[in-house]
Image: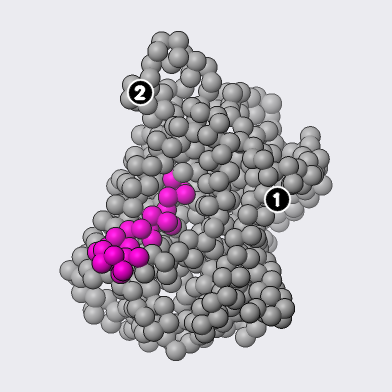
């Protein structure tokens, strides 16, 4: 039986984890607004920022462990690990929000931008009254998936392990793992129930009201509403509170914020030489501090030895097998996401049932299903690749759903009426109405899902459960990264990460960026 003390411990651990997740989510939104808007309005910044985001969002969380170790944990033995955990959660939450903001700014109607120019709106006015409101629906739509991805890697963020070095932070991921490993099954299930209950509460009290509020900031005259669910009646006061707070106010927070930003910008403009000098000095001093704390020559020698042990053929085979797994998972995800999104768009009754349900399911930590999936695959004697692709699918499918369903809700109703008038239906309707309208979101969703897929490889291709190790038989870059972290092999970890980053950079440059450019051109022609 579970004691009152253990129940209090579970609730306290949940509070600590939720605090880390919330701080990381706020940082993710602020970062996304900064880089997404800049990339959306400036061609030069776009050419620099988007490729970097493409690469960073595809780097598995394990590859950020050395950075967390050498920069954050070395700051302070108590505060450092907490900062490192928030940073690691941030790396799993931020990318789809950043791409959503970028997409929202890129797809702003030309007449809106021309009106802003003709009215002589300054940069801060455009930021407050145009760019942030335009990005708000995409932020609200991507928050559930970001929260779910943070939960997906919560255990890895609260138990930071590199070789023999290990830091355990108090949180729901840590104590649920301890309950399972110590055989306290009732306590383990209670902790999982607490997580599920907290996720459902977050959806009803925060995520869905935010999506409801975001309807005010959509430019489409006939954009569909976020469907209502019966249990929202219990949280209706919270939604009304959001409405009163933001009623008739520009985002992010009204005139006081705008005045402060204007004052800050004027100070920077008047003293730009001093500000630039201070920024450069801070960068040089911080770099010198961390470079002095490590032996650069030894570090380079370790990394070079990692490249030597990997060779040339093995990394290509690993990346090839991993790419096949990720692509297979995305194809399976699209096979159900596109038909279901169309069905939801066409049948409003299903929308009111399925969309809120999917919002809750997307926020649940998929890692809870890992022991179950491993057991089912082993008991049914299925190929281990089946389990790996299933785990990748759990980490990618909701990105596809939220990007595509959000695009479906933005289809103008008059175009739907034209299709009804001319009796255009079936595949012909999909080809001439749905596909052109959802194409940019479809491409961006696949891009973000592929980044999420590369991230999940470190779990899908190799998992250590106490003394049991699950791993695919064929090579994989995620498998190599997991083995490097387990053995504390920094050289192999860095070398494998650089191989992955190089391949992703080439793939994004030659394929995804060109595909997205073509998709936006097609939408421009359709519009």
Relative placement, left or right, of 492 versus 295 is left
On whether residue 113 falls in the magenta region, the answer is no
Residue under numbered circle 1: 205
Residue under numbered circle 2: 426
Indicate the secondary structure of the residue bearing disc 1: helix
Q: Residue furthest bottom?
A: 164
Q: Image quarter for residue 312?
A: bottom left
Residue 84 in view in this figure: no
Disc on res. 57: none
Q: Residue 45 placed where, x, y %?
A: 49, 47
Highlighted range, magenta: 376-400
The disc, 2 or 1, on the residue closer to the chain's N-terminal end is 1
Crowd rating for badge 1 (residues with CA inside 10 Å; few <14, some 14–19, many 20+): some
Q: Residue 495 placed where, x, y %?
A: 32, 73
Relative placement, left or right, of 243 versus 82 is right
Q: Residue at x 63, y 65 (%)?
A: 194
Q: Residue at x 60, y 70 (%)?
A: 191
- Of residues 375 and 246, the one nearer the viewer is 375
Residue 515 in view in this figure: yes
- Of residues 440 and 288, the one nearer the viewer is 440
- Of residues 413 and 311, the one nearer the viewer is 413
């Amino acid at each position: 039986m579970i004691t009152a003390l253990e129940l209090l411990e579970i609730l306290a651990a949940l509070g600590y984890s939720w605090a880390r997740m919330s701080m990381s989510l706020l940082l993710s939104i602020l970062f996304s607004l900064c880089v997404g808007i800049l990339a959306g309005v400036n061609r030069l910044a776009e050419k620099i920022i988007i490729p970097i985001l493409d690469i960073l969002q595809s780097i598995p969380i394990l590859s950020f462990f050395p950075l967390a170790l050498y920069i954050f944990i070395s700051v302070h033995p108590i505060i450092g690990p907490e900062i490192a955990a928030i940073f690691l959660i941030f790396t799993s939450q931020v990318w789809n929000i950043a791409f959503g903001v970028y997409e929202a700014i890129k797809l702003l109607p030309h007449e809106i931008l021309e009106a802003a120019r003709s009215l002589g709106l300054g940069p801060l006015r455009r930021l407050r009254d145009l760019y942030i409101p335009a990005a708000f629906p995409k932020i609200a739509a991507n928050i559930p998936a970001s929260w779910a991805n943070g939960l997906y890697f919560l255990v890895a963020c609260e138990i930071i392990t590199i070789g023999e070095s290990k830091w355990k932070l108090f949180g729901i991921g840590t104590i649920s793992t301890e309950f399972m490993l110590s055989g306290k099954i009732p306590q383990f299930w209670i902790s999982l129930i607490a997580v599920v209950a907290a996720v459902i509460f977050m959806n009803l009290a925060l995520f869905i009201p935010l999506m409801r509020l975001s309807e005010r900031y959509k430019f489409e005259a006939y954009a569909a509403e976020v469907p209502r669910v019966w249990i929202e009646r219990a949280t209706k006061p919270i939604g009304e509170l959001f409405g009163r707070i933001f009623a008739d106010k520009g985002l992010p927070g009204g005139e006081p914020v705008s005045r402060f930003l204007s004052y800050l910008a004027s100070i920077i403009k008047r003293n730009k030489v001093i500000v630039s000098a201070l920024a450069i000095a801070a960068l040089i001093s911080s770099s010198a501090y961390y470079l002095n704390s490590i032996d650069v020559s030894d570090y380079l020698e370790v990394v070079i030895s990692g490249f030597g042990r990997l060779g040339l053929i093995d990394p290509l085979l690993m990346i090839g097998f991993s790419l096949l797994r990720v692509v297979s998972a995305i194809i399976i995800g699209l096979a159900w996401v596109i038909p279901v999104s169309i069905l939801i768009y066409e049948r409003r009754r299903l929308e009111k049932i399925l969309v809120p349900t999917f919002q809750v399911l997307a926020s649940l930590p998929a890692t809870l299903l890992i022991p179950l999936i491993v057991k089912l695959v082993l008991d049914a004697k299925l190929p281990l690749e089946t389990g790996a692709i299933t785990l990748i699918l759990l980490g990618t499918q909701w990105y596809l759903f939220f990007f595509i369903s959000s695009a479906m809700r933005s289809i103008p109703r008059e175009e739907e009426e034209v299709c009804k008038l001319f009796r255009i239906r079936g595949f012909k309707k999909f080809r001439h109405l749905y596909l052109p309208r959802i194409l940019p979101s479809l491409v961006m969703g696949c891009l973000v899902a592929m980044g999420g897929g590369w991230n999940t490889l470190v779990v899908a291709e190799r998992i250590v459960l106490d003394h049991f190790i699950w791993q695919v038989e064929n090579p994989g870059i995620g498998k190599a990264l997991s083995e490097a972290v387990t053995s504390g092999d920094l050289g192999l970890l860095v070398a494998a990460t650089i191989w992955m980053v190089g391949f992703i950079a080439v793939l994004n440059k030659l394929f995804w960026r060109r595909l997205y450019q073509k998709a936006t051109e097609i939408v421009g022609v359709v519009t």
